[in-house]
Image: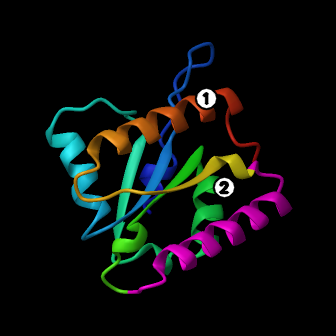
Amino acid sequence: MTASVATEPRPASGTNPVPRILVFSTNNISDPGIDLAGSSHMHYSPGVRVIGLPCTSGIRPSWIVGALQAGFDGVFVASDGDECAYLHDCSKRSSAIVAAAQASMRERGIDPQRLRLAAICSVCSEPFTKHVQQFSAALAELGPVQR
């Protein structure tokens, strides 16, 4: 994550800011689905930023909390589900990481609803856009993270 992405200015007060969402995706499975959404000109929030990883089970809970503390309104983990090429128990590991991150968020007074996990396959462009649209709407209702 770069500082310039995390510190993008919000719109002037009085306007509805677009929630900023950091998406952790996987290079081989979920990233192609997200790319397909873009190349198919499907609409989803302009506040989405994507970071590709080999496997979502490599995410650290501190990265999630750090993103929220640095200016993102939510974090979406686009997991491979049961299709992970690296680990047969990736889904279980990724779920445990999300649970640990949510516990850490609670300790810091950050609403755990700001973190979502979903399996996104290489052709799941429509499900991805629906997930992100719903998440963006939920984050807009929550308002900005209290830092």
Q: Residue at x 66, y 55 (%)?
A: 69
Colouring method of the image: rainbow
Residue occupied by mark 1: 140
Q: Residue at x 27, y 69 (%)?
A: 27
* Up/down of 40 relative to 108, above or below: above
Which class describes the residues within 10 Å of circle 2: few (<14), some (14-19), or many (20+)? some
> Which of the two discs, 2 and 1, labels the residue nearer the N terminus?
2
Q: What residue sits 43% from the left and 52% below the top?
A: 4
Question: Residue 43: horizontal and vertical position, in percent?
Answer: 30, 29
Residue 61, image x and y in percent? 63, 72
Query: Residue type at mark 1?
Result: Ala
Q: Which mark is residue 69?
A: 2
Q: Quadrant of residue 126?
A: top left
Separation (CA) of disc 2 from disc 1: 17 Å
Amino acid type of the residue tagged 2 in the rendering: Gln
Residue segment shown in magenta: 87-111
Q: Main secondary structure of the magenta part?
A: helix
Badge number at residue 67 = none
Which residue is at 62% across, 73% downward?
97
Assign the N terminus to one quadrant of the image.
bottom left
Mark 2 element type: helix
Left/right placement of residue 7 relative to residue 145 reads left
Element marked by disc 1: helix
Q: Quadrant of residue 63?
A: bottom right
- Tell me the crowding category of disc 1: few under 14, some 14 to 19, or many 20 or more residues within 10 angstroms, Cα based: some
